[in-house]
Amino acid sequence: MEDIEDVLGAAGLSGGGAPPGLRLPLAAVAVKPKRRSSRVAHAPPQPEAGIPGTQSDSEYMSGQLSAFGYAITEDPEGADLWLINTCTVKNPSQSAMTTLISKCKNANKPLVVAGCVPQGSQGLKELEGISIIGVQQIDRVVEVVEETLKGHEVRLLSRKTLPSLDLPKVRKNKFIEILPINVGCLGACTYCKTKHARGHLGSYTIDSLVDRVKTVVSEGVREIWLSSEDTGAYGNLNVQFFLGLLMIDPCGNYMVISYFWLAKFSGRDIGTNLPNLLNAIVAELPVDQSTMLRIGMTNPPFILEHLKEIAAVMCHPCVYSFLHVPVQSGSDSVLKAMNREYTVGEFRKVVDTLCELVPGMQIATDIICGFPGETDEDFSETVNLVKEYQFPQVHISQFYPRPGTPAARMKKVPSNEVKKRSRELTSVFESFSPYQGMEGIVEKIWITEIASDGVHLASAYQFFLAINF
């Protein structure tokens, strides 16, 4: 195996052809004749498999490859190289990656794997002999593709700076810009692998994000989705200090045998916060409401102190009255085992405040069924919470143990019980009629794409409800 830094050397890519200073992202592509006859197939993450930020990474990688002279292709059999972007949020996502890798090897195609899985699980057997690129290296995807096509196995993972927001981009939907506002998170949930891959929080500056908004508005984008592992954590810094006890043997070797939490310091990683960012972005949106802003997923802890400011922004006519706030469980004991850093009461405060201050506010949430240690009483508390609020969207997942996480070592709830709870909660959710009584209401809508049936148009209106007609 050769490290890409050694392969490239100081001279950079051989053969030239890239715009000055340009680095490019992951995609299934075909090289244009002026470069060579090679073609590359890109497998982006499935929508249900990951977060919008992962999709944005794919779009950036596709844009860079296209700018360098490659052409995106949907024909994996005719491609000369496969490029797979991955997500590690759920176990089935990683299983899908493994299946694609097997298909690629059987087809005897060169392969590059990008995204959270190789970044967070570099020692996976499935990744042996394969070129990989990390989540903060997407601006160098062309280099990795070029060297892989030459027969080199390259791995590019280490980086401490964020990729530029001004890289070329090929959007899956030309009317929707997925805009990452930060990378990484401040949490340490016991079941999650995302932080293993994306690391600690790093936020883009307000100026760089506002400049990107101006650019995409001028390009005719109709929706801007702010993307993040935790939107509310934008600009925050959260550092914990521990005291460790060491055991030292006669040879001088040592081992940490226990540690104690001493202090937790919270501050700003770039000296600002989410309300400041939102107000700066809203100021650049067209007054005719031709471009709408969707605020991305946020966990309760970091927006509790800004609820009134966020509510004020969400009352703006160019901002969807919609927010995705995962609760994961209606039981405080389960939330503690998950290390979610909030209580059910604090989640309720977020929902109640926003629904009180924002007309027509819509809250989506997530639930994990069958987390280790979840009792019948814990699950009943979750069901009662969902019944009380009758959320219009609930993403229900069964617990999957992710390798290397603390939850993977916890005592499991029997799988048949996990499935039973998932079915029960799904049945409860499907009994709701959250949009009953809306017939006859006249609303302005934003058409963004053709529906999946290929016949109807897909659109949304002020409360970010999908409408096909």
Image (spheres, rainbow, N blue to C red):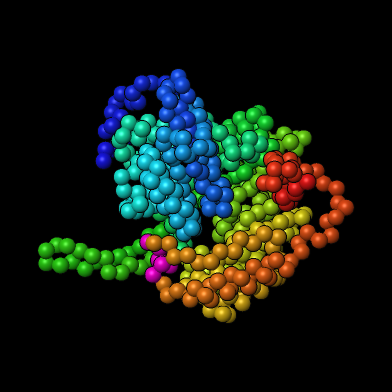
The answer, for residue 329, to whether it is visible in the render is yes
Residue plotted at (47% across, 39% down):
76
**Side of 149 where 447 appears, left or right:** right
**Side of 456 where 418 appears, left or right:** left
Q: Residue furthest right?
A: 440
Residue plotted at (56% across, 64% down):
397
* Quadrant location, the N terminus: top left
In the image, residue 359 lies at what x, y percent?
77, 54
Instruction: Give the prevailing secondary structure in the magenta stretch.
Output: helix
**Side of 154 where 347 appears, left or right:** right
Q: Note whether 414 is above or below 99 in the view shown.
A: below
Q: Residue furthest left?
A: 251
Q: Nearer the viewer, residue 398 or 271?
A: 398
Residue plotted at (41% across, 59% down):
240
In the image, residue 100 lies at what x, y percent?
44, 48
In the image, residue 389 lies at what x, y percent?
70, 67
Residue plotted at (88% across, 52% down):
440
Q: How many marks?
A: 0
In the image, residue 324 lies at what x, y percent?
63, 55
The span picked out in magenta is 404-409
